[in-house]
Image (tube, rainbow, N blue to C red):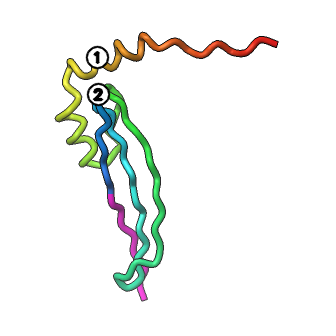
């Protein structure tokens, strides 16, 4: 009657800037039978530090986030204007 835990990752790539969305499943097993599962989602944008993420996400980021992709995303971000707070 031993409890163990494992993690599974599902990655989705969101165009046009190759944003990586990761769904992490934390799975609890009792005698190799799943007894519980929880999910956590997070997204990483081109240029983000992914050193703390899973190896799969790091490999995908390295492959997709070329200098051109990061520059295009940064240019897109620079064009975004912050919302104006309402005046009272």
Q: Which residue is mark 2?
A: 16
Q: Residue furthest right?
A: 88
Q: Position of residue 58 (x, y in %)?
A: 25, 41
Residue drawn at (36%, 30%) of the image? 45
Where residue 11 sits in the image (x, y, percent)?
A: 30, 48
Say which residue label 1 marks: 72
61 to the left or right of 80: left
The magenta segment is: 1-8
Q: Secondary structure at mark 1?
A: helix
Main secondary-structure element of the magenta-colored stretch: strand
User: At 29% across and 32% down in the image, what residue appears?
Assistant: 15
- Total labels drawn: 2
Image quadrant where residue 18 sits: top left
User: At x 32% / y 55%, what residue is drawn?
Assistant: 9
Point 25% across, 36% down: residue? 61
Q: CA distance from mark 2 to mark 1?
A: 9 Å
Q: Position of residue 74 (x, y in %)?
A: 35, 16
Q: Name the quadrant containing residue 19.
A: top left
Image quadrant holding the C terminus, namely top right
Q: Are marks 2 and 1 in contact (CB under 8 Å)?
A: yes
> Magenta span has 18?
no
Q: Classify 10 Å Cα crowding around label 1: few (below 14), some (14-19), many (20 and above).
A: some
Which is closer to the viewer, label 2 or label 1?
2
Q: Earlier in the sequence, mark 2 or mark 1?
A: 2
Callout 2 secondary element = loop
Q: Is residue 44 above or below residue 54?
A: above
39 versus 13 height, above or below? below
Residue 4 included in the magenta stretch of the image: yes
Q: Locate the N terminus by quadrant.
A: bottom left
Q: Residue furthest bottom?
A: 1
Vertical arrangement, residue 15 with respect to residue 29, above or below: above
Q: In the rendered view, does 19 fall on the left or right side of 38? A: left
């Amino acid at each position: 009657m031993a409890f163990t835990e494992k993690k599974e990752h599902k990655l989705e790539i969101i165009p046009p800037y190759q944003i990586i969305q990761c769904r992490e499943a934390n799975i609890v097993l009792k005698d190799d039978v799943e007894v519980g599962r929880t999910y956590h989602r997070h997204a990483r944008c081109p240029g983000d530090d992914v050193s703390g993420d899973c190896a799969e996400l790091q490999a995908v980021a390295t492959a997709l986030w070329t200098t051109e992709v990061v520059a295009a995303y940064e240019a897109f971000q620079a064009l975004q204007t912050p919302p104006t707070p309402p005046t009272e």
